[in-house]
Image (cartoon, rainbow, N blue to C red):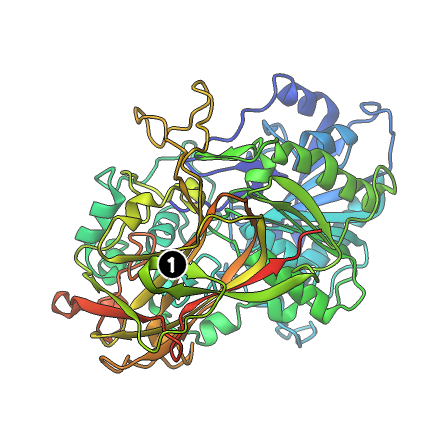
């Protein structure tokens, strides 16, 4: 099931049924009850709609600091429960440090969700030129105006506030955080969009490289449903029953994506909209928030995770858009070795079989996030962040840069060579091509174990199983004689041909460990699934980044075109950024395949509207990848010069 973490119930963390957050500390619930009082309001917006907020204020005398206190607010579509001023949450605030420092925590139900009136829209589009509200006439509202009106009310009606507001949110609440600071209320002094949904068509949850993220989207929308106001969350959450623990089997048997849409029987237009808008049309364009990140006055800390399986590209798009439209703005990027929202709840010391050498999540909460809000909202305990504060995987160290990507990064290409070789030197041969047969009835799985969800560990999982398949090409360097650090986007540039009229080309960048790489201690060895044997790390093929490219979009995202059967074409793409050091003795590998199932929907390999493809339109295709002097294929990367 797709996991979109939301800070709800005034930043109470709520996670998917398949992910267990750390339990509140032994004294956390009691601390909240003795140090905070709760109030609920229904705030009138400029268009007459009332939006719900819950407010938690420090109790008089509970803190050494008697105030006044700043606000720290989250807006969410995931519910601000528990509802009722006598009902307190088990967890409050983005971190224990902030909870114990003393803030006025605020949670707002998004328009049209749970206790808020109005109509909910998926990623409610921002309106640049709004119609002003005049008596008897309609006016334009969006998430920016809703936040503005909410802040204005809070400043006037909540006692003992210092006039400063911070905004924070993860995933969907990250989108609301980004939208809140466009043309923002002057009291908003600090904001942290974390894994913000930004553009669902471009590598940010919905589509990647033009390919529909199948199991992630369907798994999410079976739980995220349209609502009729008011709708309270159920007392207990019941996971969706897929009828099998094997998602590969479930989605293969489901057939074309249209059949999954029919399972909703017309009750979930949210999934339907994701499925049918298969090109970059106006539905997606008006929901690209990065185009509207203007007039931002707050200090911004954008947060993301290198292994975020849901909203990986959103932080980078948001960070760069703020810089582009707001020269001189206080705008920093923080990225760690984290899964979706993992920095807020987990230690962050490992993911699956890969160890990061320290508790990076703990470090972020105490040494980065806490000082950020303290500095801009209270004027203490901190200092401005570097432009980019990023964790370097592979070497497992934090790096500070004054730009992202680093200014020292040099553009190079890793070329495919004969005999499965990979090299920074281009091919010199006049002829050279590798081929494989792609069969959509037997797609390449994205993991080598049975799962009924999208395990976040797939983002750095072992790829040895894939390299053994005949429908996967693998190219690797010789063992490196020195460390090689890659930072920034990864851009596959393929020269290919196909016997089909459409095909996918999935490209994976992989770190191959030496054969003598030590196994973890026996008491800490990672296990893929319950009862599985510990993994052997010698020869481990760690996924660093992987993305599909749907060939029909090679020339245009708006107007796809069929592949000319048997003729060579260029298929180029861009993967979300990395910051990874391939250590001396390791190898760099690139794998190429034409399916990644059920993470990505199956391409029938005929030029059709894929969600509605007929069974007979799913055909085998022979894929040719060229690697010669006149038609070189490879992956363009940014190599950071070692200091």
In the shown orientation, is residue 481 left or right of residue 462? right
Give the x, y percent position of residue 17: 41, 35
Q: Could you tell me which residue is drawn at 46 percent across and 48 percent down?
A: 479
Give the x, y percent position of residue 164: 82, 48
What residue sits right under mark 1 in the picture? 421
In the shown orientation, is residue 529 left or right of residue 297? left
Q: Could you tell me which residue is drawn at 24 percent across and 54 percent down?
A: 263
In the displayed structure, would residue 319 be above or below residue 84?
Answer: below
Give the x, y percent position of residue 621: 19, 68
Give the x, y percent position of residue 137: 64, 75
Q: In the depicted view, which residue is nearer to us: 146 or 500? A: 500
Crowding around mark 1 (Cα neighbors within 10 Å: few <14, some 14 to 19, many 20+) is some
Q: Is residue 93 visible?
A: yes
Q: Quadrant of the N terminus?
A: top left
Q: Is residue 116 visible?
A: no
In the displayed structure, would residue 631 be above or below residue 366?
Answer: below
Q: Could you tell me which residue is drawn at 45 percent across and 56 percent down?
A: 205
Quadrant assignment, res 96: top right
């Amino acid at each position: 099931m797709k996991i979109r973490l939301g800070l709800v119930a005034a930043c109470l963390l709520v996670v998917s049924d398949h992910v267990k957050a750390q339990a509140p500390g032994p004294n956390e619930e009691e601390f909240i009850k003795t140090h905070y009082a709760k109030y609920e309001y229904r705030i009138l917006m400029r268009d007459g709609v009332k939006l719900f907020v819950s407010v938690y204020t420090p109790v008089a005398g509970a803190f050494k600091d008697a105030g006044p206190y700043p606000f720290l607010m989250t807006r969410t579509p995931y519910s601000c429960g528990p509802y009722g001023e006598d009902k307190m949450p088990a967890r409050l605030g983005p971190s224990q440090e902030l909870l114990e420092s003393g803030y006025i925590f605020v949670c707002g139900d998004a328009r049209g969700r749970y206790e808020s009136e109005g109509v909910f829209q998926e990623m409610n589009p921002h309106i640049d030129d709004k119609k002003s509200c005049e008596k008897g006439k309609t006016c334009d509202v969006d998430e920016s105006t809703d936040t503005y009106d909410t802040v204005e009310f809070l400043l006037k009606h909540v006692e003992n506030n210092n006039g400063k507001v911070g905004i924070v949110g993860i995933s969907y609440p990250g989108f609301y955080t980004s939208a809140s600071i466009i043309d923002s209320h002057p009291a908003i002094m600090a904001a942290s969009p974390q894994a913000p949904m930004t553009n669902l068509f471009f590598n940010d949850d919905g589509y990647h490289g033009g390919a529909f993220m199948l199991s992630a989207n369907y798994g999410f929308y079976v739980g995220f449903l349209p609502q009729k106001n008011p709708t309270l969350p159920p007392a207990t959450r019941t996971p969706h029953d897929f009828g099998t623990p094997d998602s590969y089997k479930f989605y293969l048997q489901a057939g074309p994506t249209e059949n999954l849409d029919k399972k909703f029987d017309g009750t979930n237009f949210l999934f339907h909209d994701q499925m049918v808008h298969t090109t970059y049309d106006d539905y997606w364009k008006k929901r690209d928030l990065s185009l509207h990140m203007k007039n931002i006055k707050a200090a911004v800390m954008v947060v993301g995770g290198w292994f975020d399986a849901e909203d990986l590209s959103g932080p980078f798009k948001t960070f760069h858009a703020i810089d582009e439209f707001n020269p001189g703005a206080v705008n920093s990027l923080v990225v760690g070795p984290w899964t979706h929202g993992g920095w807020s709840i987990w230690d962050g010391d490992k993911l699956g079989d890969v160890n990061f050498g320290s508790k990076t999540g703990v470090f972020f909460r105490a040494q980065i996030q806490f000082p950020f809000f303290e500095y801009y909202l209270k004027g203490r305990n901190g200092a401005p962040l570097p432009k980019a504060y990023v964790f370097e995987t592979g070497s497992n160290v934090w790096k500070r840069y004054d730009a992202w990507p680093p200014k020292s990064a040099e553009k190079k290409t890793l070329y495919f060579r004969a005999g499965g070789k990979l090299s920074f030197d281009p091919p010199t041969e006049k002829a050279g091509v590798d081929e494989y047969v792609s069969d959509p009835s037997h797609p390449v799985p994205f993991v080598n174990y049975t799962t009924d969800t999208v395990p976040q560990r797939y983002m750095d999982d072992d790829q040895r199983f894939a390299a053994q398949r005949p429908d996967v090409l693998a190219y690797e360097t010789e063992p490196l004689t020195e460390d090689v650090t890659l930072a920034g986007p990864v851009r596959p540039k393929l020269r290919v041909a196909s016997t089909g009229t459409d095909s996918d080309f999935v490209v994976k960048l992989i770190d191959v460990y030496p054969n003598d790489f030590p196994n973890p201690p026996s008491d800490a060895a990672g296990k893929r699934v319950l009862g599985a044997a510990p993994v052997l790390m010698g020869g481990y093929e760690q996924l660093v980044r992987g993305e599909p490219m749907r060939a029909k979009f090679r020339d245009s995202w708006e107007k796809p075109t069929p592949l000319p059967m048997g003729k060579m074409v260029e298929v180029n793409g861009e993967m979300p950024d990395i910051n990874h050091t391939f250590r001396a003795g390791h190898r760099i590998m690139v794998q190429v395949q034409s399916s990644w199932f059920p993470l990505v929907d199956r391409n029938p390999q005929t030029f059709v509207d894929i969600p509605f493809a007929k069974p007979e339109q799913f055909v085998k295709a022979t894929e040719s990848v060229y690697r010669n002097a006149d038609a070189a294929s490879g992956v363009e990367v940014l190599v950071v010069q070692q200091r």
